Image (cartoon, rainbow, N blue to C red):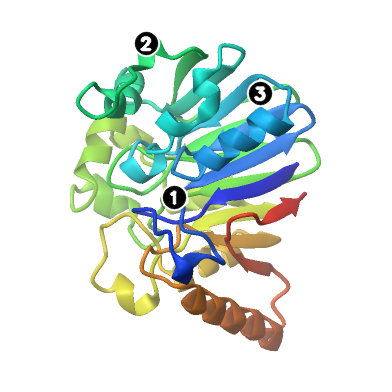
Amino acid sequence: MIIKFWGVRGSIPVPGLETAVYGGNTSCIQIIHNDKIFIIDAGSGIRKLGEFLKSHNQNFDVYLFLTHTHWDHIQGLPFFSPIFDYRYRIFIHGPSMLGKLKNMVSGQMGYIYFPVKVDDLASYLEFRELQKETFTIGDVKISTIYLYHPTACLGYSFEDGKSKVVILFDFEVDISQNEILSGDYFVQMLRIIGKENVPSFEEILEFANNADVLIIDAQYTKEEYKTKKGWGHSSIPSAINFALKAKAKRTVLFHLDPGRTDEDMMLIEHYLTNYFRMKNIKMEIYVAREGLEIKV
């Protein structure tokens, strides 16, 4: 499998000179396995991915997996050029929204927001709502699990029999299952998925266990997180601790805060690399950046 990052930010796109190195587009990752094209999230990064597919790839089946339907994870879909091409079949997967996933995604293309309606698109679109389940596409096994976030949000695992790629964003590591079940946090999530579907921390840890590549939400610093609990995102130290417990071989810190400049990210990456070297930690650590490719 080949993983390529097309958008790495959370919350809002931040183009400009200060973000040119790591990138300013919101969440979008591509995984290629043999002839299969998997895309995770349709943030603003999916626009350039669409242009790339149109000019470099003759496979017209695209499997899009949405972690959830918050704006920064779907806002690029109306600008994904394959949806205007009759040759493409796009299979859109996402968390069960009580039968309303299509409405949640296509709502941004309502007439008052966008000039083209979903029903007028040239490509074939098929929506599939997911809960906690496992299924296969080709020879890739795909598993899902609910994560700790203010709305229904799925983590994904892609396995090809040789390697395992796990994607956990948006995911707040430091919220507990008990805090959610008691209604202290994430009431909307609870209402959508039901108490019986809220996983324990141990279940999420097992889901990510021994990942060859773990891509995990790490939006905040430890200090920033003190005023952001319940926002649905993890601090960098908490994300790293989770990765170490899961025994991930390589970890990519993702969903970068929009206020973080290239200089900020370089300092964080440099510090972590040196810290891991000094502590003799074998796990490889990366900060996500647009254009980064990882082969597994």
Callout 1: SS = loop
Q: Is residue 52 left or right of residue 172?
A: right
**Which numbered circle lies on residue 136?**
3
Measure the alpha-carbon separation of dots 3 and 2: 28 Å
Measure the alpha-carbon separation of dots 2 and 1: 25 Å
Residue shown at the point (70%, 84%) measured from the top left: 277
From this viewpoint, is residue 116 visible?
A: yes
Q: Amino acid at mark 1?
A: Thr
Callout 3: SS = strand
Instruction: Decide: is 235 above or below 146.
Output: below
Q: Is residue 137 left or right of residue 181?
A: right
Residue shown at the point (69%, 77%) measured from the top left: 281
Q: Amino acid at mark 3?
A: Thr
Q: Dot 1 corresponds to which residue? A: 26
Q: Dot 2 corresponds to which residue? A: 119
The image shows residue 83 at horizontal and vertical percentages of 50, 21
Density class for disc 1 (Cα within 10 Å; few <14, some 14-19, many ≥20) is many
Callout 2: SS = helix
Q: Amino acid at mark 2?
A: Asp
From this viewpoint, is residue 141 visible?
A: no
The image shows residue 130 at horizontal and vertical percentages of 45, 25
Density class for disc 3 (Cα within 10 Å; few <14, some 14-19, many ≥20) is few
Q: Nearer the viewer, residue 129 or 264?
A: 264
Q: Nearer the viewer, residue 138 or 287?
A: 287
Q: Is residue 128 left or right of residue 72?
A: right
